[in-house]
Image: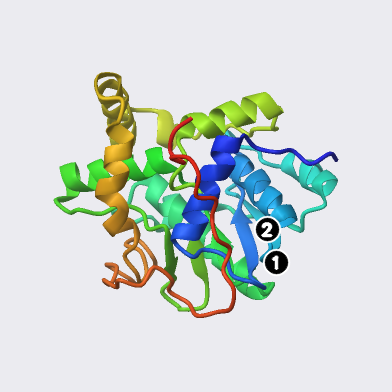
Amino acid sequence: MVPITPSRSLITAVGRAIGDYAMIRDGDRILLGLSGGKDSLSLLHGLRHLQRRAPVKFQLAACTVDPRSPEYDPSPLKAYMADLGVPYFYESQPIVESASQHMKGDSFCAYCSRMRRGILYRVARENGYNVLALAQHLDDLAESFLMSAFFGGKLRTMQAHYLNDAGDVRVIRPLVYARERQTRDFAARAGLPVIYENCPACFAMPMQRYQMKALLAEQEKLHPRLFANLLTTMKPLMALQGPEAGEQGDSSAALSPDPSPARGGGELQGTRGGRGNET
């Protein structure tokens, strides 16, 4: 398959985030959590592009967790990943079924997310991957920031780079400077085989995240630099170290001024040109 190159603005955003937060080091073995959505597929091709061109050498694989929901079938990714020649793990687990038996005080989305993360950690450990890459972008971080402030009474958002609770896997989010519209446009332009997840537990009723998304969209019409300003506001929170809130067995992140939670050799420096969070 001919390599697919993301847009320059998307590559710039990914490169800047990787450089700013020292996400990738020489010899890293990176496992990408691949749902098949536009964001994770965009990150897949962004990392493959950097793998071909960056002076720092790293290995890349991907893992899809199939929760056995009738509304979500990621199995077409198997043939696509085989064509790409990227090492690929496909984990089919009855998460939807187990949720009805074991869920206690959680939303289904929170339970499913926690179960998927645990499976990704297991696959990484069993196959010698020391870094887990996740595909949340700047819009996701902004929505999480508002949800935490509005409904949780805390200033918190997703971290860009941290060490998990067990201390054996670094978690990175190379899309934290990228906008959702960038991954959406790239996926459409490149004809990526996007798998749509239509879980009724997530979409049957308006959820807080979608309310925040709508609020941000309306405010951005009035204030075009809204997300640039939010990024500046969130950067200290994005750089917090220690396991992220929501990690199994952990309740909060520890403060640290050092943006690189693990020691190592050379680091992949990001492309510094451009704003990174603009289309």
Task: Name the disc covering residue 57, or none.
Answer: 1
Q: Position of residue 4 (x, y in %)?
A: 74, 38
Q: Is residue 165 above or below residue 247?
A: below
Q: Residue type at mark 1? A: Lys
Residue 278 is left or right of residue 206, and the answer is right
Q: Secondary structure at mark 2?
A: loop
Q: Residue at x 52, y 32 (%)?
A: 182
Task: Name the disc covering residue 54, or none.
Answer: 2
Q: Position of residue 245 (x, y in %)?
A: 32, 62
Q: Residues within 10 Å of mark 1 (few under 14, many from 20)?
A: some
Q: Residue type at mark 2? A: Ala
Q: Quadrant of residue 62?
A: bottom right
Residue 132 visible somewhere in the drawing: yes
Q: Position of residue 137 (x, y in %)?
A: 45, 43
Q: Is residue 102 above or below residue 251?
A: above
Q: Quadrant of residue 55?
A: bottom right
Q: How is the image coloured?
A: rainbow
Q: Quadrant of residue 228?
A: top left
Tell me, yes or no, whether the two marked residues, 1 and 2, touch with CB atoms within 8 Å: yes
Q: Give 174 or 191, whichever is nearer the viewer.
A: 174
Q: Give 111 or 16, whichever is nearer the viewer.
A: 16
Q: CA distance from mark 1 to mark 2?
A: 7 Å
